[in-house]
Amino acid sequence: MFNKSIRAGLLARLGISSVLFAIVVVGIQLYIATERLAATQMDLMEELLISSEKPLSEAIWSYDEVTTRKALQGLMRLDQVASVDITLANGEQYASFYKGENLMRSPLASLIFPKLMVLHRSLLAPEYSGSFRGKPIATLTIEGSNDFLFRQWLDDSLVLIVSICGLILALFAMSAIVVHRFLSRPLIALGEQLLKLDPNEKDRMFLDVPEGHDEDEIGSLVKVFNSNTIKLSLANQSMERMATRDRLTGLPNRNLALETLEQTVITARAESSQFAVYMLDVDRFKNINDTEGHERGDQLLISLTERLTSTFVTKGLFISRLGGDEFLLISELASSAERALVEAQRIIDVMREPYIMNDVAMRHTVSMGVVIYPQDGENADAIMRHADLALLSSKNQGGNQVSFFTSQLTQHIHERLMLETALSRSIDLGAFELFLQPKMHAQSLEVTGCEALIRWFKDDGTMISPAVFIPIAESTRLIIGLGKWVIEEACRILQGWVAQGRVVPMAINVSVVQLLEEDFVEFVLACLRKHQVPADMLELEITESTLIDNFDKVVAVLTEVRQNGLRIAMDDFGTGYSSLSNLNRLPIDVIKADKSFVQGVPNEAAITQLIGSIGEVLGVELVAEGVETREQLEWLRQNGFDTLQGFYFSKPIPAHRFEKLFLFKDE
């Protein structure tokens, strides 16, 4: 069966190739023959016109109808001519002969020779005609016979097709013999050897080179196959060794970690002992990959691994990489929650130390979830699940810390997931509202702008605090859709104000997750164009914490935004980690002193006063948020703050109330 399939397949392919080749060659030759026949007939008709011109001119000038008729009948006796016609100069037909053969042409003849060949020649008066000499006296028209051409074409085509097909058939037979001798027969032999190969026996792992094929392609193919077999065998051996190791770090991988955890549970159960499991990952690792590249992320993971192994390789401590930036440690030394906390904190502290990467010191923190056997789980599956929940709790609290699993944590995570689902659904439905808080001129106390603050209400009318759902939106990237809704809604409100002649800028808060989206600037500008809102009526507020991990990227985005006419404000200034050198590089128009400093004036005013000085040096607008008393207002007025915002003037209120109280109160 194997032999027949190879031979039949090769012959079938060879036969099809031969037929296709024959069709192409015949087609080309027929086309050439068609063009040649047409050109030959055209040349003949040209010669007939030239040879008939003089005798016909003299006969017509002499009104010699007999000579004219004989000359035309002579032309008509030629197979190549279908009709001749002489028309006098005054348009009168003098003589005409027509065979009638072109009236009933076959479809094939019409296809091969679609156009009739017709030539015209003017007959001039003879030299002895006196003053008429050289003037046209008639026109001779000759129409070629396409039927004659077609008959010739059929004869030539038949000879051509028979000869080419015979040649192709002979070539096919010779090719079949050669292919079988030098290709199919050795391939059949190799196929029979392949069926007998046994990868488990070294003596039966390789193919023998067919006789006479040591130096050709088949011999090379066999040698490459044998070489690859050796490499594959070595690779399989290497894979067997590496099946339980992480490729990047060399640490035990998830499979070995789970195996080790199951074995540790069995041992601890038999000995009635305890042990701790630490699950940790790098805070904001995705940002590192997105902004610095995966190579930088891999370097960080390798450095973290080296630090873990060099510092904590002690008896009873198992270190593994589960995948991504997630690691699992099993400590048989931590036999209580207290000892586990000490060891976990030590790991956190070591991870906080700077990493030297490309001669640059970088700080990266980790979050950790801790589980104690047996109280937090009696089997490997429960321990892994609870460690993951504890890690998630640590990250939800801001990262860079240790969280122990508790029974209440499961309920908390469940509630968080429910809230996340509801948030996603509400974003799709647009079930939010923008509340507005006025920003007042410090001296005139007139409204100079407002800040838009998002509000989310349950079905029963109770409000879910932004402090609860905004962190969830940022950690799940739902903030992208939510942020787009805020931008769209802000532009819609501003459009209404512009239509009524009120130019009151509005500030909206923007997350770093939004800023790092590729289409962020394009989307903002599109919304402004859609609602016909001037760019300087929209102000984007960012916090100092936005700049920690992505300073250069954020600065680039903000610069582009500002170049398009929007204003940039730094919110909660004084609570982050901005250095003065970085601050000078920021393309900002406004600095907002955090309310935690504003509420301390005038008794504790040093930081607020410093913020005012920085704003004055930078030449930006100074805004104080959180103003609640007259005393605070007066101090801020006297210390250079341009704009004030806080409950002293108004709490955040719905847009329609804001318009009634501050924009259109006279109406």
Image: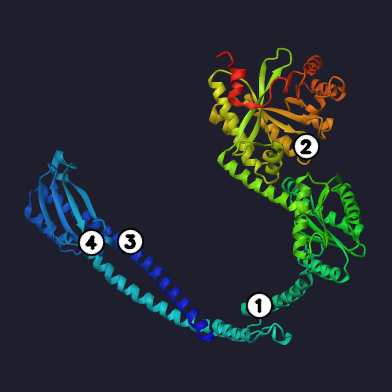
Q: CA distance from mark 1 to mark 2?
A: 63 Å
User: Residue beneath label 2, please?
Assistant: 545
Q: CA distance from mark 2 to mark 3?
A: 82 Å
User: Residue at coordinates 60% horizontally, 30% vertically from top-left?
Assistant: 490
Residue 517's place in the image compared with 405, above or below, is above
User: Residue beneath label 1, please?
Assistant: 220
Can you see residue 125? Answer: no
Residue 163: x %, y % from top left: 36, 76
Residue count near mark 1 (Cα–Cα under 10 Å), binned few <14, some 14–19, many ≥20? some
Viewer-proximal residue among 442 and 212: 442
Amino acid type at circle 3 is Glu
Say which element carries label 4.
helix
Q: Quadrant of residue 596?
A: top right
**Which mark is first along the chain, 2 or 1?**
1
- Would you say the residues marked 3 and 4 are in contact, meaning their CB atoms lie under 8 Å apart? no
Say which element carries label 3.
helix
Instruction: Report the side of 141 relative to 64 (left or right).
Output: right
Say which element carries label 1.
helix
| Marks 4, 2: nearer the viewer | 2
Q: CA distance from mark 4 to mark 1?
A: 59 Å
The way the protein has been coloured in the rendering is rainbow
Amino acid type at circle 4 is Asn
